[in-house]
Image: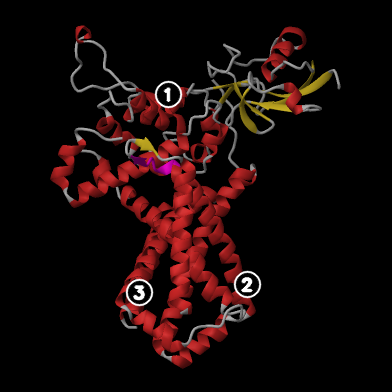
Amino acid sequence: MSVYQRPVHLLWWLERRAYVLFVLRELSSVFVAWFVVFLLLLVNAVSDGTASYQRFLDWSGQWWVVAINVVAMLFVLLHVVTWFGLAPRAMAIKVRGRRVPAQQIVAAHYLAWLVLSAAVAWLVLR
Amino acid sequence: MATEITLEVARYRPGVDSEPVMQSYQVPLREHWAILDGLTYVKDHLDGTLSFRWSCRMGICGSCGMTVNGEPQLSCATFLTDYAPGPIRVEPLHNFPVVRDLVVDIDDFMTKLPKVKPWVVREVQSPVEEGEYLQTPEELDEYQQFSMCINCMLCYSACPVYSLEPDFLGPAAIALAQRYNLDSRDEGADERRDVLSSPEGVWACTFVGECSAVCPKGVDPAGAIQRYKLTAATQSIKELLMPRISRRLNSRSQG
Amino acid sequence: MNHRRSSPEPLLWMLFSSGGMVAALMVPILLFLFGIAFPVGLLSAPSHAHLYAVLHNPLTRLVLFGLCALALFHWAHRFRYTLYDGLQLKRYAVPIVVLCYGGAVVGCVIAAGLLLTV
């Protein structure tokens, strides 16, 4: 029997908006990896001494480094929103035999995020 | 309001066409008509050669899944007026071989489904005289959502992983496995694990989430898959850390 | 008995999802401070002495190592599947796996080296 198989286009994810969003979400990981590189450069500069740290600050102030970091920030925020948004579907948490509602799980994630961010900011800016 | 709407229907005649050809039909635009009613009108009055599947006309049999304007839909639950002034593009479900016109071959799913043992598995079957296996409403609540699946295949049609990776077990099969894994009367989770935790099982899924978005019955297959990943990964790591103890525990229960 | 016991997927997924969680919680603030706020002068950058002191604390270094390692495995796993599905490169699975997880392992070694010698 001859059947018709619809071919899959190379850029199949352009077919639907949800797929585009999905691919952007997955690409956020590239910027997470970039952040690790950036952080390790900072650590290296700080451990090498004052002059090296100043050179890092100058380098990170260049327009193209700032541009990369702004784009990276947008992707990382997409990661945060999608990750926290999907979290309650991956975990079924129960407290005293009752299922915790999804919104509360999401809220707990954002709360932890705020607290940790504040702690990091305090540690760095103190 | 216009009295007619155009249906652009994908026609594929095996042995004649090498790929589907779009054919347009004018059908009455009635307020209570679903896409399926439009297709039935075409078949009865305009073109008797048009082939499509349907049965209940009320969103429970899962036979009439089609791609309507690019979105997987039950054609009996999707109304013409929502697409006015049209035209409405009606194609067979994506990701399945097309047998003819709007009819697809879902044999692949039918072979995969029994592999996850979608029934209550008991180590020892107790005789009927001993009575039913009792269950509280809370225990029912654990899996009820996943039992609403009607095997309509919209989730497979929306799943890009399934289109790229035909061996992938797929959303409905995994959600149905979870429907039994989470059932308090079931003891088959360990047997299902070989299939579910294989590379073609849950690990191929990248949580695109469209399976859940298109499900007409509000099942969340994507959620079921992620929950199972967490369960399976936790178990694997426990086994890695303390092989003997966890194997004994596993044989009892899991979800 | 079967292949599942030896499959690395559960472990890789666990690293991926822990990494995703850690990255979501920690990366935005650090990236905002050091990548945007200090470079554009929104906030004044901390002195070298202060950062050196913070970085010298073993706890800071442990946390940063955990963040780097998990975030890299998060990238490795996600990027592997993005290449498989997004660009349909599954036929090159072996080099992709080597690139992704190998890259993550190399990154972890570099991170450990840098953080230990602060």
Q: Nearer the viewer, residue A107 or C99?
A: A107
- In the shown orientation, is residue B252 left or right of residue A69? left
Quarter of the N terminus of chain C within the rendering: top left
- In the shown orientation, is residue B2 left or right of residue C63? right
Q: How many marks?
A: 3
Quarter of the C terminus of chain C within the rendering: bottom left
User: What range of the chain is rendered magenta?
Assistant: A89-95
> Residue A91 magenta-drawn?
yes
Residue hosting label 1: B147
Residue located at (59% from left, 28% from top): B93
**Tags 1 and 3 on a common chain:** no
Task: Give the image location of residue B202, x and y in percent.
Answer: 39, 40
Residue hosting label 3: C60
Task: Give the image location of residue C81, x and y in percent.
Answer: 46, 51
Dots 2, 3 in contact, CB < 8 A:
no
Task: Give the image location of residue A103, x and y in percent.
Answer: 49, 44
Marks 1/3: CA–CA distance? 48 Å
Quadrant housing residue C98: bottom left
Q: Nearer the viewer, mark 1 or mark 3?
A: 3
Amino acid, disc 3: Thr
Residue reaching furthest to the bottom: A51
Dots 1, 2 in contact, CB < 8 A:
no
Is residue A11 visible in this depiction of the protein?
A: no
Residue reaching furthest to the front: A96
Amino acid, disc 2: Ala
- Tell me the subunit letter for badge 3: C
Residue located at (42% from left, 43% from top): A90
Residue hosting label 2: A67
